[in-house]
Image (cartoon, rainbow, N blue to C red):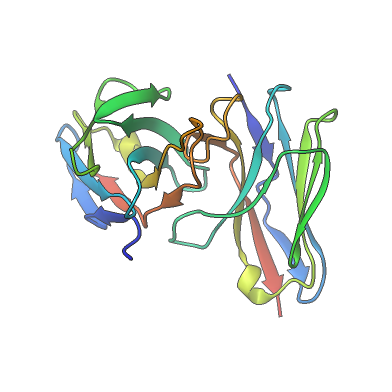
Amino acid sequence: QKEVEQNSGPLSVPEGAIASLNCTYSDRGSQSFFWYRQYSGKSPELIMSIYSNGDKEDGRFTAQLNKASQYVSLLIRDSQPSDSATYLCAVPHDRMKTSYDKVIFGPGTSLSVIP
Amino acid sequence: DAGVTQSPTHLIKTRGQQVTLRCSPKSGHDTVSWYQQALGQGPQFIFQYYEEEERQRGNFPDRFSGHQFPNYSSELNVNALLLGDSALYLCASSSITGGGQDTEAFFGQGTRLTVV
């Protein structure tokens, strides 16, 4: 049974700071990793995907992957109040495919950016 | 271009009743997946439909069933409702590429089901 774990939070950071969100996964064979953002009462939205060890940057977001440690993180630079949401880490149900829509989600980390 | 649409948005049912939730995928998508998200939890994969057949199923009892129509829309049916079935039910659509991989999935806004 694959598992994805995250600190549930809430994580509070001041506006302009770096928010660091962490995730660990149980299946050493997982190849793809996703970060979703979910605003309260809304549906999840894919914001980052990462497949190789190291860092992947997209605007203010950086995803970091360490397969040896089975650890993936999301950094949000210059955090804004609009970043306040729950961030969900996910891995594909089928490790052999980049299955965006059959994924195992972690419980999510609630982020609050304080103005 | 309409995204993924779900209906109804909210629903209240009594324990033991049956419920049907509906999902229309994003234009150009042919695959529909259903998730259950309990309050404070991440979404849990229920099953996926492609070519009108269930492709894969998560760890949910047979009370949860589904259907996909020729126009790719889908229904989720839950029989003998339990209080624990109260959750946000999300539908996600995608399409299968020529290489067998799934494209990015887009989620609908969900149906909030309350069982009393």
What residue occupies the far front of the structure in this picture?
Answer: B98
Q: Relative to A82, is A26 above or below?
A: above
Q: Quadrant of residue A113?
A: bottom right
Q: How many marks?
A: 0
| Residue B90 position within the rendered picture, expressed as x and y whole percent measured from the top left | 37, 47
| Residue A61 position within the rendered picture, expressed as x and y whole percent measured from the top left | 74, 61
**Location of the N terminus of chain A (image quadrant):** top right
Q: Is residue A87 left or right of residue B32?
A: right
- Nearer to me, B34 or B4: B4
| Residue drawn where x is 57% and y is 29% of the image | A97
**Location of the C terminus of chain A (image quadrant):** bottom right
Q: Is residue B58 left or right of residue A34?
A: left
| Residue A65 position within the rendered picture, expressed as x and y whole percent measured from the top left | 80, 41
| Residue drawn where x is 80% and y is 31% of the image | A67
Q: Quadrant of residue A41?
A: bottom left
- Nearer to me, B75 or B38: B75
| Residue B31 position within the rendered picture, expressed as x and y whole percent measured from the top left | 35, 39
| Residue drawn where x is 82% and y is 71% of the image | A17
- Nearer to me, B60 or B3: B3
What residue occupies the far left of the structure in this picture?
Answer: B17
What residue occupies the far bottom of the structure in this picture?
Answer: A115
Q: Is residue A33 left or right of residue B16?
A: right
- Nearer to me, B30 or A104: B30
